[in-house]
Every structure is written in structure tokens, then in C-alpha cells.
Image: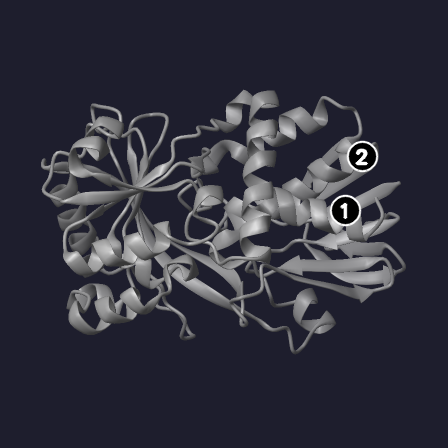
């Protein structure tokens, strides 16, 4: 079988991986010289802990298994089974974590409520003031800015993979066939459009009423911390945004402990991961209304800096990078992904939202199974 994958981000690359693993030939086409969207502009978190139960959690757990397996074969991914900690400072925050730890699927997520002393033993860099923490053992991390590069190196080594950058697909010309802006037609037994947040052009022509929206976020990265941050770190505002934490305790937290005004205005949570070079990736915000602003705002960065410094008990290293990114999210946020046949032999796979990096291996596996690869 010959598979054409359109899109060089992590979802597209994982579809290429699945096809090559199953013995097929793959041509992957990317409109930029390299992927430049949400697949790079993210935390690199394999984030199991906050996922909704049912299909979403099952997908995340399967993806976590696949990431570890692929990481053992592709060391350049930088896969680390580091887990995450969410420090807790108030009785309301503790009650939300306690309710989460009592979920029937808590063991699958690796939830454990730990005291401050145990949390600091797990992550000694957390020297700030907090009373307890929610430890999530199943969370992990990879290096988002280089993951696709290393995956493609491994794919090329099979002799059954070709990467064609700098080509934009303009038209579906027949069953399993697409034409690019160079005038070349690419034919296969299946075409997967994994175009991420690029929802205009061909995608709009094929699916005018696509139930997917775009979301913008701001993030930053520091100089090396100078010591290991041995886990990912979240703050209790993350409880407000991840479905696993929904409970009566969360309702009480929302009523009694409103977010800081800047955090509420920008729909913020703290997520933080250390990169292999020692720097910290820190975010994030959420913006849903179009058109998106073209500039980044300082207030959210100042808020995040204050939260991080309060957990670390020390000043943050110098900020080296600030950026905004855009990802595609199903308008029904309970859906893991939008997968649709849009022409004969052509499928669109988009809209995983903030789950893209976490769930992409399992999303691609499901596509391969459904298409009979």
C-alpha cells in the first residue's frame, strides 16, 4: 500500500509512522520547510492525568504506551517518564485533588496525594510554600521542537518513506490522489490530511461546515534553570480546565476561590516542563475569539513568572523565548479528534486540541485500524 500524508506535524508524522510500521510506503508532504505549528509550540507533555474518562483517557493511556515504545527506538525524542506534580496551597485545592484521587480510574492515571515533604523528595526544585501536591505518575515528556526531525530520520532509514517539504496541497484530483502547488500529482491507496490548525484552502473546500475551531495560546522558555526539575509542574488553576477534575469540590473551589484577574481574563493555567538543555517551557493562555491578536501580551507572562517563582522559591532564569501558537480543537471538546472521509480515498484527521502531542500515536493507530492498513 502507498499512503500519502499531508502535514508535517506530530499527528501527520505519527500517521506516517503507523503506515511504515505496517509495511507500507509513505510520502509525507508539508507546506513549510519544516512543521512550524502547534506540534512545535507546545510543552512536549504526554499528559494523561487531566483527561476525561472513557475514550479520552483510553486514548491517552494507549498513546503513553506507544510514546514509550517509540522513544526506546528513537532516543532523539527525549522521552522521559517524569510524572507531574500539582502543588496545593488551600483546603479547596486539596479537596479537588482528593476527589480526583478517589476516582475509580485514579490508579490508571497514577494519582497519589502526597505531603509537601514527599513532593520535594520527588522534585527537590520545589522549595516554595505549599501544603501538599497531587502526584501523577503516568505523565511524561518529549522534546517537541525536535521530535518530528528524529522520527523522520528513523522513517527514512526504512527505505519506504519520502518527505516532501515546501509543497501545499491544492486539490483532490481523484480517488487517493492530490495535486500540489508545484503542479505535481501524488497518488496512493489512501490520503490522510493532517493539516493541524490550517483549516482554510482545501480543507474549507472539502468540509465547509467543519466542527473544529482554532485556539491561540502564549508560552515562553527560559535559560537553563541550573538544576533538574524532575517532574512537570502544574498549578491548581489547571483543575479548572481539565475534565478529570470536575467534581462538587471543583464547584466549591470556583465559588470560593476565584482566579486572579489576569488568569481569569486570559483563561490561564500554569504548566511547566524542563527541556533537555535545562530551560523551562512555561505557559499558558487560551484565546478563542477570532480574529486573534497579532501581538503577545506581557500581563500573562508576569502572572506565570510569579506563580513559578512562588513554587521554586527562587527567581526565574532569564526568559529567552516568547511565542504564540494556534491549535485546532473540536467544537465538541469531549471528542478526541475529528476523523472524516472527505473524498474517495481521502480522510481528514484534525481537531485534537490540546491533546495533539499526548494522543497523536493512538490517534494515528486508530486511523490505521479503521482504514484497514
Residue named by callout 1 = 368
Colouring method of the image: one colour
Q: Residue at x 41, y 71 (%)?
A: 288
In the rendered image, is residue 114 in sight? yes
Q: Position of residue 261 (x, y in %)?
A: 16, 69
Viewport quadrant of the N terminus: top right
Residue on which the image places disc 2: 22
- Mark 1 neighbour density, 10 Å: few (under 14) some (14–19) many (20 or more): some
| Quadrant of the image occupied by residue 242 | bottom left
Q: Earlier in the sequence, mark 1 or mark 2?
A: 2
Q: Nearer the viewer, residue 110 or 262?
A: 110
Q: Vertical placement of 119 versus 6: above or below?
A: above
Q: Quadrant of residue 22?
A: top right
Residue 40 in sight here = no
Label 2 element class? loop
The location of residue 184, given as percent across then percent down, is: 81, 50
Decide which of 72, 114 is in the foreground and name it.
114
Amino acid at each position: 500500500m502507498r499512503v500519502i500524508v499531508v502535514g508535517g506535524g506530530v499527528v501527520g508524522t505519527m500517521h506516517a509512522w503507523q503506515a511504515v510500521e505496517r509495511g507500507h510506503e509513505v510520502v509525507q508532504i508539508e507546506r513549510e520547510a519544516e512543521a512550524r505549528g502547534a506540534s512545535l509550540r507546545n510543552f512536549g507533555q504526554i499528559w494523561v492525568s487531566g483527561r476525561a474518562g472513557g475514550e479520552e483517557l483510553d486514548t491517552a493511556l494507549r498513546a503513553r504506551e506507544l510514546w514509550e515504545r517509540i522513544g526506546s527506538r528513537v532516543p532523539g525524542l527525549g522521552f522521559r517518564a517524569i510524572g507531574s506534580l500539582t502543588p496545593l496551597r488551600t483546603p479547596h485545592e486539596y479537596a479537588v485533588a482528593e476527589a480526583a484521587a478517589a476516582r475509580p480510574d485514579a490508579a490508571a492515571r497514577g494519582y497519589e496525594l502526597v505531603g509537601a515533604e514527599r513532593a520535594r523528595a520527588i522534585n527537590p526544585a520545589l522549595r516554595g510554600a505549599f501544603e501538599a501536591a497531587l502526584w501523577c505518575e503516568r505523565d511524561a515528556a518529549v522534546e517537541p521542537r525536535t521530535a518530528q526531525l528524529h522520527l523522520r530520520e528513523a522513517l527514512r532509514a526504512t527505505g519506504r518513506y519520502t518527505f516532501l517539504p515546501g509543497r501545499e496541497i491544492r486539490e483532490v484530483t481523484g480517488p487517493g490522489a492530490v495535486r500540489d502547488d508545484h503542479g505535481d500529482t501524488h497518488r496512493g491507496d489512501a490520503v490522510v490530511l493532517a493539516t493541524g490548525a490550517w483549516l482554510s484552502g482545501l480543507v474549507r473546500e472539502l468540509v465547509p461546515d467543519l466542527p473544529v475551531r482554532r485556539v491561540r495560546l502564549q508560552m515562553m522558555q527560559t535559560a537553563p534553570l541550573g538544576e533538574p526539575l524532575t517532574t512537570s509542574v502544574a498549578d491548581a488553576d489547571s483543575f479548572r480546565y481539565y475534565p478529570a477534575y470536575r467534581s462538587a469540590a471543583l464547584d466549591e473551589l470556583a465559588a470560593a476561590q476565584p482566579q486572579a484577574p489576569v488568569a481569569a481574563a486570559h483563561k490561564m493555567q500554569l504548566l511547566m516542563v524542563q527541556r533537555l538543555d535545562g530551560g523551562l517551557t512555561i505557559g499558558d493562555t487560551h484565546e478563542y475569539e477570532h480574529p486573534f491578536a497579532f501581538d503577545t501580551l506581557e500581563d500573562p507572562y508576569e502572572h506565570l513568572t510569579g506563580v513559578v517563582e512562588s513554587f521554586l522559591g527562587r527567581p526565574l532564569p532569564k526568559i529567552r523565548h516568547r511565542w504564540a501558537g494556534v491549535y485546532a480543537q473540536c467544537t465538541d471538546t469531549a471528542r478526541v479528534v475529528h476523523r472524516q472521509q472527505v473524498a474517495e480515498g481521502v480522510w481528514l484527521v484534525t481537531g485534537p486540541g490540546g491533546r495533539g502531542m499526548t494522543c497523536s500515536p493512538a490517534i494515528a493507530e486508530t486511523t490505521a485500524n479503521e482504514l484497514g492498513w
